[in-house]
Amino acid sequence: MVTDEQVRRLRKLSNTEKNQELAAAKAGMDPATARRYLRLERLPSELKKERPWRTRGDPFSEVWGAVQKQIEESPSLEAKTLFEWLQREHPGRFSDGQIRTLQRRIKLWRVTEGPAQEVYFGQVHVPGRLCASDFTHMTELGITLAGQTFEHLVYHFVLTYSNWETGTICYSESLESLSEGWQNAVWESGAVASEHRTDSLSSAVNNMSNLEEFNRRYEGVMRYYGVKPQHTNPASPNENGDCEQSHHRFKRAVEQALLLRGSRDFQSMAEYAQFLKDLFAQRNAGRRARLAEEIAVMRELPARRMESAKRERVKVDSGSLIHVERNAYSVNSRLIGAQVEARLYLDHVEVWYGQKKVEHLPRLRGRGKHRIDYRHIIEWLVRKPGAFENYRYQEDLFPTSRFRMAYDALRESTPQRASKEYLKILKLAAETGEVQVDEALRELLAGEAEAVFTVESIREVLVRLDTIAPVTMVEVTLVDLASFDQLCTGMQQ
């Protein structure tokens, strides 16, 4: 068979040799064949005709109509799913080895007759014009803090020209998270782009019942920095494609970094935050030149950051509680009846009264939650011990499992005085320290004799607390290996 390379050599030799016979001989072909290819001026591969017939019968010809109907109604159906469906509909007719034939036929149909696919249009990015951001869920990566599952999100920020990125750990897609994360990003970059694009987040974009396009507080943040806000259409994440693609690459990079690290557990939030910060720095290392182009044309930052907290005026009710964002927080009982200002930040709540901060509380996630600090109400619980047994938030008044065990032991030994005695122990924890009292309870619970849980017995343990071995000291008894020798000897016999 004559190859394309032979014909190319023939053409070259025909211009240098004395005659065609000599050129054909050097090209390794018959003179008649050489004359034919020189006359046609075509390569052998260009003369090959497509085969119009099948070499074997199509095993899916009789069922193709049903298959085509399925993929027309549900274009996302995979060939493997349809093949398994055919095997169920026609038992014994199709063997597993025929799946590749169906896959090829479906692929051919999709390309030649199937529906048009979505087209992505490449955009021209101008330095310093646009930044984009969105929230991405991180729980799927299996990250833990001190052994506990850490459910969280990352507010992810990207400069679309240089692809410079950064992020902030948060717990919900709230306006506080958006404001805090966005300000963290622009202050880290050192300048601000002229436009900012987000998805149609409820924290930034009003619903159709509101005539104003953007949430007033979000628009206020953008106006403060001189930035024009944009948002994508609902259910169209591809319109924020730069950020969406960065999500995918960032999470893949986190996964790889965790595999290299050899562990997904972090001792504290600070350690995990530093891990992400180092990863962002590593990913941004190759983007410095394009980032410098952006910084040169971006707007300068204002003199100071804008406060990202949401402020609410609430009244402290008779239970020494404030209700903020449908969650309940206890405050000092001295504030009962007073109007206070609650400032909601990304991860904490501050309570202010008379221009003075009186409480700093961890922010609850979700709705319908409560956080009751026994220190706020213990004075009056001691005076009203009867209220403890049916108190709505009783579970919050057991700081650790040992406090709960002490209360259960009191209910068994002295049920009539259990609440009163336990509240005295709780008051002692508020006065002398929860950790110390917890250690004393550990010592009493570990005692061989039946423990007596009273304030007096705990005070006695507190006096000698320095002599008690910490819980981290574990004594391992040496194993006598002679018993294993005897066992092995017995098995050999």
Image: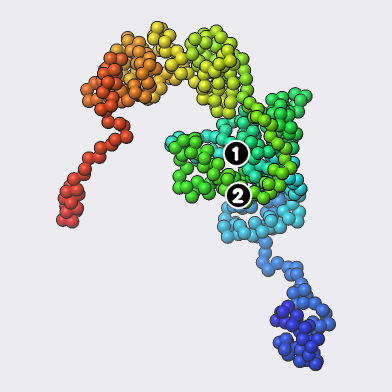
- Mark 2 or mark 1, which has the lower sequence index? 1
Disc 1 crowd rating (10 Å Cα; few below 14, some 14-19, many 20+) is many
Could you tell whether 445 is left or right of 52 in the image? left
Could you tell whether 258 is left or right of 78 in the image? left
Instruction: Identify the secondary structure beneath mark 2.
Output: helix
**Residue 302 locus on image (x, y percent):** 69, 31
- Residue sitting at 80 percent across and 77 percent down? 42
Q: Is residue 458 visible?
A: yes
Residue picked out by circle 1: 167
The correct choice, above or below, for 137 with respect to 362 in the image is: below
Most extreme residue toward the front is 303
Image quarter of the C terminus: bottom left
Q: CA distance from mark 2 to mark 1?
A: 16 Å
- Residue sitting at 59 percent across and 51 percent down? 84
Instruction: Identify the secondary structure beneath mark 1.
Output: strand
Tell me whether circle 2 and circle 1 mark residues in contact (CB < 8 Å): no
- 386 or 271: which is nearer to us? 271
- 400 or 302: which is nearer to us? 302
**Residue 452 locus on image (x, y percent):** 26, 17
Q: Is residue 70 visible?
A: no
Residue picked out by circle 2: 285
Q: How many marks?
A: 2
- 437 or 210: which is nearer to us? 437
Image quarter of the N terminus: bottom right
The correct choice, above or below, for 449 with respect to 259 in the image is: above
Q: Amino acid at mark 1?
A: Gly
The correct choice, above or below, for 470 with respect to 407 in the image is: below
- 145 or 482: which is nearer to us? 145
